[in-house]
Image (cartoon, helix red, strand yellow):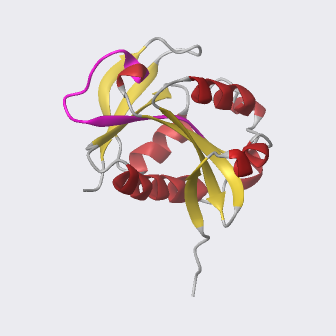
């Protein structure tokens, strides 16, 4: 019998912060995700941002940020109550094991509990990030056909997924 790893998510609070600061990405991913120290500092300085850790057991293996105002992703409002997902990544030492898909499933479950009135989750993914785009599509995100051109590394696809109710 196959045992799936215990993948869960938790807010980056004081007890997790130092371990989260040790997370790294592959050099080739730098165009898509900035350094974790910058990501945390930005999230902690923005109202409505929730810095989150992806955990395998009690070990941080990744990071993401939830935006309670999805407008900040693409500069426009959404029809339904929508959250934003930003800066999602799995540490380079943990990549290639299916943890990205498991982490997204954990995120959906967490959002249903912590943000029960939200109906959708939106994100942008760089048009050159084929791996990320494939992961998000497998997780049920739909490409809206809209490109966001405000990113530092070129155009990004806007993807949206309905959240469980």
Residue in view at x 66 percent, y 32 percent: 40
Q: Residue furthest bottom?
A: 1
Residue 131 place in picture, x, y as percent: 55, 40
Magenta-colored stretch includes residue 100: no
Place residue 122 in its image quadrant. top left
Image mark count: 0
Q: Is residue 62 visible?
A: yes
Picture quarter with the C terminus: bottom left
Say left or right for 116 vs 148: left
Q: Residue 29 or 66: which is nearer the viewer? A: 66
Residue in view at x 58 percent, y 74 percent: 4
Q: Residue furthest front?
A: 14
Residue 2 place in picture, x, y as percent: 58, 82
Residue 39 place in picture, x, y as percent: 65, 29
Magenta-colored stretch includes residue 77: yes
Residue in view at x 73 percent, y 51 percent: 15
Image: 107 above or below 77: below
Say left or right for 149 vs 141: right
Q: Is residue 95 visible?
A: no
Residue in view at x 69 percent, y 63 percent: 58
Q: Residue 18 or 97: which is nearer the viewer? A: 18
Q: Residue 157 or 110: which is nearer the viewer? A: 110
Place residue 18 in its image quadrant. top right
Place residue 30 in its image quadrant. top right
Image: 118 above or below 86: below
**Which range of residues does the magenta coloring cover?**
73-88
Q: Residue 106 or 45: which is nearer the viewer? A: 45
């Amino acid at each position: 019998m196959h045992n799936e790893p215990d993948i869960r998510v938790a807010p980056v609070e004081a007890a997790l912060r130092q371990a989260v600061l040790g997370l790294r990405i592959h050099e080739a991913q730098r165009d898509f995700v900035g350094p974790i120290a910058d990501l945390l500092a930005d999230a902690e300085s923005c109202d409505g941002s929730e810095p989150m850790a992806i955990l395998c057991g009690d070990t941080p293996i990744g990071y993401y940020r939830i935006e309670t105002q999805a407008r900040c992703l693409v500069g426009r409002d959404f029809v339904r109550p929508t959250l934003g997902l930003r800066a999602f990544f799995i540490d380079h030492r943990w990549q290639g094991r299916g943890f990205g898909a498991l982490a997204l499933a954990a995120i959906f479950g967490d959002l249903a509990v912590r943000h029960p009135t939200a109906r959708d989750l939106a994100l942008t993914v760089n048009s050159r990030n084929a791996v990320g785009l494939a992961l998000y599509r497998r997780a049920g995100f739909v490409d809206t056909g809209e490109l966001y051109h405000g990113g530092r590394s070129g155009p990004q696809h806007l993807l949206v997924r309905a959240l469980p109710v």
